[in-house]
Amino acid sequence: MLRAVSPYGYGPLYKNPMTDILDQLDFDSVCSNEGPALFVNATRVRNGKLRVFSGDEINAQVIMASACLPTLFKAVEMFDTETGRDEAFWDGGYTGNPALFPFFDSALPRDIVVININPLEREELPTTPQQIQNRLNEISFNTSLLRELRAIDFVQRLLENGTLPSDSMAHVYTHMIADDALMNELSVATKSVPNAYIIKTLKEVGQAAAVQFLDAHFDDLNVQSSLDLREMFA
């Protein structure tokens, strides 16, 4: 149905389901200078370019834009200070999933920890329309992430062999927390049908994956990468 019905067909009945939740957030606290730096990316529909929001730019509209799958939700329209005009935005995963370059700032920690929820590999061949569309979306979103990781690997090699001066680019360490086995087992429907049991399971498995990562790689943090990018791209 998502391939045949547009969210614009709902007329006055349409409402983004995230609106009521996001309106309750205190963005002055969320975007405060005290605490972690926050970056949110979206895809500008008009030209397909990545837009990274930070600081006071982040609000409910920006959050909705970053999660706007165009087959489910209307594009989020708002004024863009970068272009000086009203723009429409879709999910940032199409152009940066996530965008990693903001983390190259020397003022930020050197470790980049990616929490991956889309499996990089699926052994089973997708055969139903839903499975095929799901795998296409996974490949599309993963491509953005892999492109950024490949760029990181390239720059780190240039720094290591002296082609680039050590102070010209940030030397970062990359890590990944994931549970591809679980993500391969879950039905495609779990991505779009809210289910308390699935959400609870994801939370518990996510916590377990984080503990497993820390047990295995805590000593690597701020020392070396635990993610072998060259093996990933071999």
Image (spheres, rainbow, N blue to C red):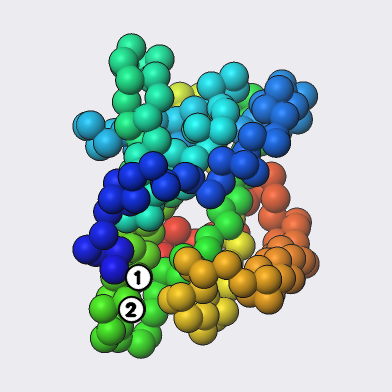
From the image, which quarter does the N terminus lie in?
bottom left
- Residue on which the image places disc 2: 131
Residue 127 location (% of width, % of height): 26, 86
* Residue 114 placement, left or right of 126: right
Decide which of 57, 140 is in the foreground and name it.
57
Query: At x 40% / y 15%, what residue is drawn?
Result: 81
From the image, which quarter does the C terminus lie in?
bottom left
Residue 99 is at least partly visible in this image = no
When asked about the image quadrant of residue 188, the answer is bottom left
| Secondary structure under the numbered disc 1 in the rendered image | helix
Whether 227 is drawn above or below 190: the answer is: above
Whether 128 is drawn above or below 195: the answer is: below
- Residue on which the image places disc 1: 134
Classify 10 Å Cα crowding around label 2: few (below 14), some (14-19), many (20 and above): some
When asked about the image quadrant of residue 231, the answer is bottom left
What is the count of numbered marks? 2
Q: Which three-letter amino acid code belongs to the residue tagged 2?
A: Gln
